[in-house]
Image: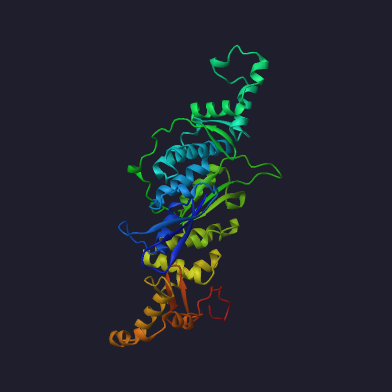
């Protein structure tokens, strides 16, 4: 629904995010933007929206979590409800001279669509007046007039008067009569994201026979899962093992692994990886994501190898841009006095581009390198008599 940038004053980098997002995706975006606590000041910029009329009404000081809730609500509406929502926004904008609308108000508009009415393809006063006459939607003042007299009426003036009386608005879809906007949501209860209680989530169902459509209910397994939890899921589906199942949905709390799972043959390996990741400290989880990004890792097996050898990598989270990367690299090489003397005379951007190569990567999570100075590449399974890298 929305595509936004998160940016923190004084930092070179920003974080792109698509809304609606899961709690894990929200927390990851905040981490990438170097927003580490609720006291940090940052901005949210909407640069793309499925509804192109809407961004101009989003306040500059929009709260990310409220904006995410608005995106969720909009995706839950059907086409008719979205057309009604647009009418509500247009009505509000006319009354406020097209000023930004509080997110609380916009969210409550998504709950007020059922009270609206729409006349599709009616886009001006003349068409509205004609529509009302054709359907005999007129008040007592016209009752009793002959058909000849009704045909002589000015449909444009009739439409204009009806629109004024009803508080209706024209949208690209048609004529909307807005309903009441009830106070369902309050900004006093902003839905802050919570760390998910899983690393991966998998919806599985019993494998249908032959070409039959799978209409059976699914079961959600959250990894890491115990053997007992997995057995209970199979029992609920009426199967003995994962071979008798198909998966319907896969979700990852690690964004870099959102496309890593595609075959149920990796079911148990995915659970093993989840156990490893769940045991990581927060700093190591951040490093894990940085290595996955730098190595362009997209498989469960490679991710497991990376997770097992994280102590071979160093991540400097403070680096958010090329200039930061250059400064932090120099600080590692020089004493404090040497660094302070040399720093004013160094082109940091040029130095960073010179140094950033296979052995150092500026990731979304900071400056990544290997302690042994080796290249950052996706690891592979060891073959007999061969090294891992």
Q: Residue at x 42, y 56 (%)?
A: 44
Give residue 248's position: percent from left, percent from top: 58, 48
Q: Position of residue 124 (x, y in %)?
A: 59, 34
Along the horizontal axis of the image, is 173 left or right of 254? right
- Residue found at x 42% / y 64%: 32
Q: How does the figure colour the protein chain or chains? A: rainbow
Q: Above or below — where is 377 with respect to 227?
A: below
Which percent across, then down, holds residue 382?
55, 76
Up-down relation of residue 319 to residue 113 (above or below)? below
| Extreme residue in the left direction | 337
> Can I make out residue 281 in this image?
no
Between 204 and 336, which is closer to the camera in this rendering? 336
> In the rendered image, which quarter is residue 205 located in?
top right
Nearest the viewer among 100 and 114 is 100
Along the viewing direction, whichever of 238 and 208 lies nearer the viewer? 208
Measured as percent of width and height from the top left, residue 220 is found at: 51, 47
Measured along the vertical axis of the image, is residue 294 above or below residue 195?
Answer: below
Q: Locate residue 384 relative to residue 310 in the image: left or right.
A: right
How many discs appear? 0
């Amino acid at each position: 629904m929305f595509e936004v940038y998160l940016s923190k004053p004084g930092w070179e980098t920003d974080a792109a995010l698509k809304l609606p997002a899961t709690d894990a995706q929200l927390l990851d975006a905040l981490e990438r933007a170097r927003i580490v606590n609720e006291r940090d000041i940052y901005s949210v910029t909407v640069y793309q929206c499925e509804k192109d009329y809407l961004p101009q009404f989003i306040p500059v000081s929009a709260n990310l979590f409220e904006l995410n809730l608005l995106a969720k609500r909009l995706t839950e509406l059907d086409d008719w409800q979205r057309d009604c929502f647009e009418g509500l926004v247009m009505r509000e904008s006319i009354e406020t001279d097209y000023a930004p609308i509080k997110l609380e108000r916009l969210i409550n508009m998504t709950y007020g669509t059922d009270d609206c009415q729409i006349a599709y393809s009616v886009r001006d006063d003349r068409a509205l007046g004609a529509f009302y006459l054709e359907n005999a939607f007129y008040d007592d003042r016209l009752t009793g007039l002959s058909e000849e007299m009704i045909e002589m009426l000015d449909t444009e003036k009739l439409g204009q008067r009806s629109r004024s009386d009803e508080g209706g608005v024209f949208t690209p879809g048609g004529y909307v009569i807005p309903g009441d906007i009830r106070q369902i949501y309050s900004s006093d209860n902003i839905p802050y994201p919570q760390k998910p209680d899983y690393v991966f989530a998998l919806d599985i169902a019993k494998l249908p026979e032959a070409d039959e459509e799978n209409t059976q209910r699914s079961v959600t397994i959250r990894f890491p899962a115990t053997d007992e939890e997995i057995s209970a899921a199979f029992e609920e589906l009426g199967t003995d093992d994962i071979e008798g199942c198909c998966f319907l949905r896969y979700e990852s709390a690690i964004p870099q692994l959102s496309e890593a799972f595609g075959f149920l043959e990796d079911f148990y390996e995915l659970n093993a990886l989840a156990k490893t990741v769940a045991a990581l400290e927060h700093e190591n989880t951040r490093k894990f994501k940085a290595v996955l990004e730098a190595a362009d890792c997209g498989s469960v097996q490679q991710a497991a190898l990376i997770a097992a050898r994280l102590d071979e990598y160093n991540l400097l989270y403070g680096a958010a841009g090329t200039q930061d990367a250059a400064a932090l690299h120099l600080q590692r090489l020089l004493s404090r006095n040497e660094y302070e003397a040399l720093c004013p005379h160094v082109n940091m951007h040029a130095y960073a581009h010179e140094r950033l190569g296979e052995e150092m990567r500026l990731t979304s999570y900071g400056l990544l390198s290997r302690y042994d100075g080796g290249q950052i590449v996706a690891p592979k399974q060891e073959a007999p008599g061969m090294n891992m890298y």
